[in-house]
Image (cartoon, helix red, strand yellow):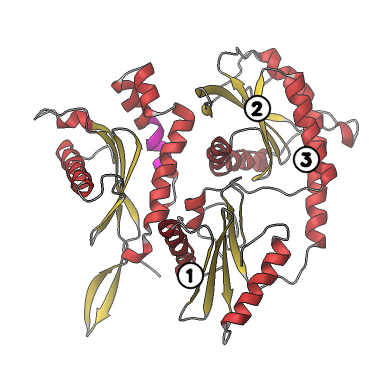
């Protein structure tokens, strides 16, 4: 549906009510406000209104925080990531002009904004900020309020300019990881290279291995890997691929194919002949003793990517990167070629006649995610089902979250003959979309069973 005014981010702000409690000092509560050119009076009024709404709703249920407020023209989402800190996202409701009895009138499409989807987008903004900067409390402990405001402005101004709110959907609720299934032999080769790397370079705390935008191996905690994976596939890897497509990877040796070396650092020195190691990002990982800060060193060869986490206390010199390059260059190039051969072989042997059923799968235990509803990971609206049908998936997810069943199944039929099935079992969620006229529940149930048998043979779904 074409909109006169599409969904858009109106305001995004962070505040802490513990500051500026005296009259005339209300501005001290505001830690970040977007857009930054908003006049101070408007900022103070927005924060004050949010404080009043949150305090008012606490009188009804002090154990459950207010998460959203619906008005005709806006949708407000509230998230309290840490004690005292609130993040608020205000969205403009999309509109369309409709004609009734010869008169045009504006209609607000509030159903297109789903609370669970956009609340998750808000939560992800915090998790992404914390990965690269630490928690709000940590920054205050290490520095002061001025430094926190500076870090928020520096990071979020860039982050908010890149998020694609109009294409947010159920995958934003999950923020899952796409895994690449490999045969035992190839996976063992990956495991061998990773183990040999960590043994040869004891400075490396943990490692993650990706091929294209799919994860093959990770030594990180699932929560950390989930956020890091989203950063890699949405920001770093697309930029690297664009650079490689423009310039093309250049082999460093050419005696034989097995000796080809396409390796390069995606974070680290661009020229190993210079002493400058470049800018290396730091990430804050969770541990049993709190937060651990690590250097994030990323090395790529062809479509394979190795992420190495090294403790912040370790001093990184150019000779370390030179030795890494010698160790990884040929090994990773050869391994990437082996994985590419298996992937192409698997594609050639796959069943050509695809089922008309599309699905979204998510595993809460290992954060695994798989979707045939989405045709790529670029968040550009490239989907294989109508957008109104896609929204039903998020509605079913919201229903599961509210009712909190251990197992459950919901089936929905739309007016245009789409069937949507949502299954919850063993901390796994499975959503199927089938477009079939004149079908009945028995036939739809059989289609879902066939899909489970073909795609998830080893996964148990309660009947």
Which of marks 2 and 1 precedes in the sequence? 2
> Start and end of the magenta stretch?
154-160
Task: Locate residue 148, reporting x and y percent.
Answer: 34, 25
Specify whether residue 130 is in view.
yes
User: Which element type, helix, strand or loop, lies under badge 3?
Assistant: helix
Classify residue 310 by image quadrant: top right
Pointer 2 with pointer 3, Cβ within 8 A = no
Query: Dot 2: within a 10 Å radius of its alpha carbon, few (fewer than 14), some, or many (20 or more) residues?
Result: some
- Residue occupied by mark 1: 389
In front: mark 3 or mark 1?
A: 1
Q: Is residue 158 magenta?
A: yes
Q: How many marks?
A: 3
- Residue occupied by mark 3: 336
Residue 444 falls left or right of residue 84: right
Task: Locate residue 383, reporting x and y percent.
Answer: 55, 63
Q: Who's the residue at 20% across and 40% down the image? A: 47
Which of marks 1 and 3 precedes in the sequence? 3
Q: What is the CA distance from the residue labelled 2 to the residue labelled 3?
A: 20 Å
User: Which element type, helix, strand or loop, lies under badge 1?
Assistant: helix
Classify residue 108 by image quadrant: bottom left
User: Which element type, helix, strand or loop, lies under badge 2?
Assistant: strand
Which of marks 3 and 2 precedes in the sequence? 2
In front: mark 1 or mark 2?
A: 2
- Residue occupied by mark 2: 206
Task: Locate residue 89, reporting x and y percent.
Answer: 32, 46
């Amino acid at each position: 549906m074409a909109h006169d005014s599409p969904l858009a981010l109106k305001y995004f702000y962070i505040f802490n009510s513990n500051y500026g409690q005296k009259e005339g000092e209300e501005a001290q509560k505001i830690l970040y406000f977007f857009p930054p050119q908003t006049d101070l009076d408007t900022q103070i009024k927005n924060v004050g209104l949010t404080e009043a709404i949150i305090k008012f709703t606490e009188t009804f249920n002090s154990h459950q925080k207010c998460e959203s407020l619906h008005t005709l023209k806006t949708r407000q989402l509230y998230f309290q990531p840490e004690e005292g800190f609130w993040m608020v996202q205000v969205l403009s409701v999309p509109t369309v002009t409709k004609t009734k009895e010869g008169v045009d009138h504006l209609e607000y499409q509030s159903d297109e904004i789903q609370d669970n989807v956009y609340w998750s987008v808000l939560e992800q903004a915090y998790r992404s900020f914390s990965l690269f900067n630490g928690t709000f409390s940590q920054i205050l402990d290490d520095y002061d309020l001025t430094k926190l405001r500076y870090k928020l402005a520096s990071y979020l101004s860039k982050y908010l300019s890149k998020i694609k709110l109009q294409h947010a959907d159920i995958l934003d609720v999950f923020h899952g990881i796409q895994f690449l299934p490999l045969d035992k032999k190839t996976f063992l080769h990956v495991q061998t290279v990773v183990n040999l790397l960590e043994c040869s370079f004891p400075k490396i705390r943990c490692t993650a291995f990706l091929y294209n935008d799919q994860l093959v191996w990770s030594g990180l905690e699932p929560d950390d890997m989930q956020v890091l994976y989203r950063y890699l596939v949405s920001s770093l890897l697309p930029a690297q691929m664009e650079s490689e497509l423009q310039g093309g990877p250049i082999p460093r040796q050419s005696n034989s194919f097995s000796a080809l070396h396409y390796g390069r650092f995606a974070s680290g020195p661009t020229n190993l002949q210079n002493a400058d190691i470049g800018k290396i990002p730091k990430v804050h990982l969770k541990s049993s003793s709190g937060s651990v800060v690590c250097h994030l060193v990323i090395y790529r060869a062809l479509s394979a990517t190795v992420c190495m986490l090294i403790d912040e206390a370790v001093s990184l010199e150019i000779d370390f990167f030179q030795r890494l390059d010698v160790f990884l260059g040929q090994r990773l190039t050869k391994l990437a070629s082996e994985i590419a051969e298996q992937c192409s072989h698997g594609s050639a042997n796959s069943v050509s006649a695809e089922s008309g059923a599309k699905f979204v799968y998510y595993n809460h235990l290992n954060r695994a995610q798989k979707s045939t509803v989405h045709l790529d990971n670029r968040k550009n609206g490239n989907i294989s089902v109508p957008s109104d049908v896609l929204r039903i998936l998020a509605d079913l997810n919201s229903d599961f979250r509210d009712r909190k069943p251990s197992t459950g199944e919901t089936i929905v039929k739309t007016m245009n003959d789409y069937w949507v099935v949502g299954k919850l079992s063993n901390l796994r969620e499975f959503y199927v979309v089938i477009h079939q006229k004149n079908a009945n529940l028995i036939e739809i149930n059989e289609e879902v069973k066939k899909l489970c048998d073909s795609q998830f043979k080893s996964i148990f779904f309660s009947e």
